[in-house]
Amino acid sequence: MTELLSFEKSRQNAHGPRLPEADVESPGPDDVLPRELLRAQPPGLPRLSEPEIMRHYSRLASMNYSISEQFYPLGSCTMKYNPVANEAAAALPGFTDLHPYQDEETVQGALSLMWRLEQALCAVVGVDRVTLQPAAGAHGEWTALRMIQAFHRSRGEARTEVLVPDSAHGTNPASAALSGFRVVEVRSGPDGRISLADLESKLSPRVAALMLTNPNTLGLFEREILDVAEIVHATGAMLYYDGANLNAFMGICRPGDMGFDAVHMNLHKTFTTPHGGGGPGAGPVGVKADLVPFLPTPTVERMNGQLKLDFKRPKSIGRVRSFYGNFGMLVRAYTYIVAMGGDGLTQASLDAVLGANYLRHEVEGLLEMPHEGPCMHEFVASARNLAPRGIKALDVAKGLLERDFYAPTIYFPLVVPEAIMVEPTETESKATLDAFAAAIKEIVTQADESPETLHEAPHGLPVGRLDEVATARHINAYLQGQSEDPILRWKKAP
Amino acid sequence: MPYLVHSPEDRAAMLAALGVSSMDDLLIDIPRSLRLSALELPAGLSELETMAQVKSLAARNRVFADRLTFRGGGVYRRFIPAAVAAVTSKPEFYSAYTPYQPEASQGTLQAIYEFQTLIAELTGLDVANASMYDGATAVAEAAMMAHIHTGRNEIVVVGYLHPEYLEVLRAFSEGRGIKVRRGTEPNSKTAAVVFQQPDFLGLLVDAAGLTENAHSLGALAIACVDPISLAIVAPPGEYGADIAAGEGQQLGLSPSYGGPHVGFIACRKDLVRRLPGRLIGSAHDSAGRRGFVLTLTAREQHIRRERASSNICTNHSLCALAASVYMTYMGADGMRQVAEVSFKRAHALAERLAALPGWEMAFPERQFLNEFPIRVPKASAVLRKLARKSILGGLDVHRWFRELKGVLTFACTEVNDARALDELVEALA
């Protein structure tokens, strides 16, 4: 199945929408504005009737896999069920119709929701305060690093390096670099955990922070986390927690207790706000007392029984986005936390760990397991054992798509060759996990019997494997003026 | 417990398969001293009780009717076709992840490819990216593009840029040692001149002149633009700006207390490799079928790590989808119609308000579109008086700009019908 672009379906005389007239006696822009300020050519938007538009998007929707229809075991992404009650809550007019510049006394409900969400997140991760402003996880990382930078600068220390493990998510080094830090990599040991010896050798008075995920991206708990915290703090550096893997231990343990000074959370992972095909998410950051003065403005404060937005924070790093964050996502996360409660969140993490270990056990022997278990909420397998038959992690992924499963994260973390990173989450039943394991078994058998058909997978989807290399080449040609087709957008054929 | 799927028997069966007797055996790597006895949060509630609690919070907010909302400042009430929510509430769209597996993500990929094209058309520039968080971060990232491209360390902000965008730009710049200067004159150290068209107060600026001036000193010109306005006023591509950035909330997204909305960035061809975030391109499979893929990923964090053009991973895809549905639904004529209606009503309102005793246009010689600054006798008293009549009056901009004491900006759109304008003026009489 393919679907023409809206631009290709556009017809010059299609019925557009009926819209109101001005109903006031007043000149229009053409009468008032000087010619040079006016647009010369109308924008080339498509022209389609409403029935055609609705069918267009319905057909596009049917070309997507999603957590509502498929198991989506994308490691590190925590694709769990998005409760529909969250959507109903976020759609309440008492939230959607609020202008961000309404007076504080008219938005006490919204501020109260933010205040309560902050309290709940503080309890889950063990910190003193939380900013809800960052719009995504990477935005939260950067926000935290800016606070850590401001903290050191306030003490007259020019710390210019940030340590990042080699197994870290790519946003970690990118966020550090965008904050103006030099990134220094710390190696993993043979067991997949951070090497204390390597860490010690890289620590110095130049280091501002160590960025760490725990459990790490291999799904392994950093057993020596307390030692890590001690040696990092001993040098005056701070410890930053990447919350991508928070789903592993809500109610079981807390990054704040492990010694982390700043903690980001992905509401679109752990707290079930939908991922939206690539956002909007929300990446709140929790901090310990030392970093509180540096939180972005405004914070929500309680004063004389009223909630206020506090803009007067002299040490603040300032704003990291407009207004107060992705408020609609905050409503969803809050609704989820209220429904689940402390008991429910704890059970969710326990089930996530149980499901991951169970699935790991079921596929062990089919794929290589480079590290010893138990794992936490996810595990990393390797398709290296299929290499003799010419089968790669990519082929396994495509074989899964063909069997109506979304694919796990592949080729990440970088420290595992042919990595296949599986995160089942607590909202997948044992029957689904069993079916997934059976699919892996089938693929491994197929790799043995007819590897060439696996190279051609997936069959039966809207498109087969796309030639991304050719796409990149065509873009190059366009950028170098050798082709008129921009590839990155539709353009009417000349 | 809501949303959990395992029965006690399932759990027992899985533990048995693993050959362990309890969850503690799976949590052995966590030091004992770190184990929490209980999460200190209230116990969970039924959906009925949960929704009652959330609704009681919503009920503690005061909602002003669309037609009686005259406050803008970057977020506007506009007509949102029912088509938008009908599309964005499809779980196939909202519950998918970033489209890493193109064969199973063609819906999202094609929709965002269309978004890139729509934004490129609207701004008159060559290429747009797959979305940004908001207008503020879009402007800040545009400035970072200019910094990398020119190798220069100063950003000049001309005129009334949205004050929160300026703050975000400063936060982005500070860590990297980039200087942000509010002023008018770029110099040979200037990486980019940033201006907003129309500006935060609603006034039109000489975008062509500012662009030319920036270029004469080797700096880039970054135009922060209002997408609806581009149905009427010259787009950045027509006057030669290098990068257009802006906020897309008006393209089918509700105010929602400030988010989630969507930012956009479009640029000239030679800056494409500096673009932050995701980009989608067209491709073909071995059977010759066209499809769409994430492309130019070598700029991105998961490949380039600390050398990436930005750290963006999750962006605002679903909001970009909403904006696409909106722009496709409205078409160029529909967008022009709402822009014109907004223009006419704002001008009619400005004339009537300026005739009130003690009221005067703050910048009478300047042109505007659908938002304008007006000096009033007592700003806070005016706003209180309006609120008593259930009207959300103009925005008091003195909060950000010392020189604008007593200045309110009023915004009009197609939702403020002619009768609403009468009600506003009557409330003040």
Image (cartoon, coloured by chain):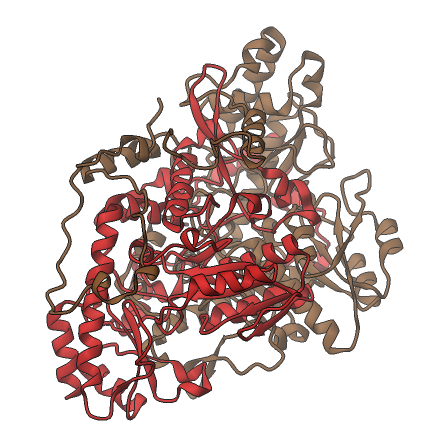
In-front residue for pair B17/A224: A224
In-front residue for pair B390/B36: B390
Image position of B83 with respect to A485: above or below: below
Query: Which residue shows up at 51% across the image and 75% down it?
Result: A299
In-front residue for pair A465/A14: A14
Query: Which residue shows up at 51% across the image and 23% down it?
Result: A466
Image position of B45 with respect to B400: above or below: above
Image position of A483 with respect to B273: above or below: above
Q: Residue A332, image x and y in percent?
A: 40, 57
Give left or right: position of A480 versus A373.
Answer: left
Query: Which residue shows up at 78% across the image and 65% down it?
Result: A237
**Residue furthest out toward the top:** A449
Query: Which residue shows up at 54% across the image and 75% down it?
Result: B183
Q: Colour of chain A?
A: brown
Q: Residue A385, image x and y in percent?
A: 71, 19
Chain shown red: that is: B
Q: Residue B91, image x and y in percent?
A: 35, 41
Q: Residue B429, image x and y in percent?
A: 14, 88
Residue B295 appearing in the image:
yes
Count how many numbered circles sit on residues in the image.
Answer: 0
Give left or right: position of B14 versus A42.
Answer: right
Residue A82 appearing in the image:
no
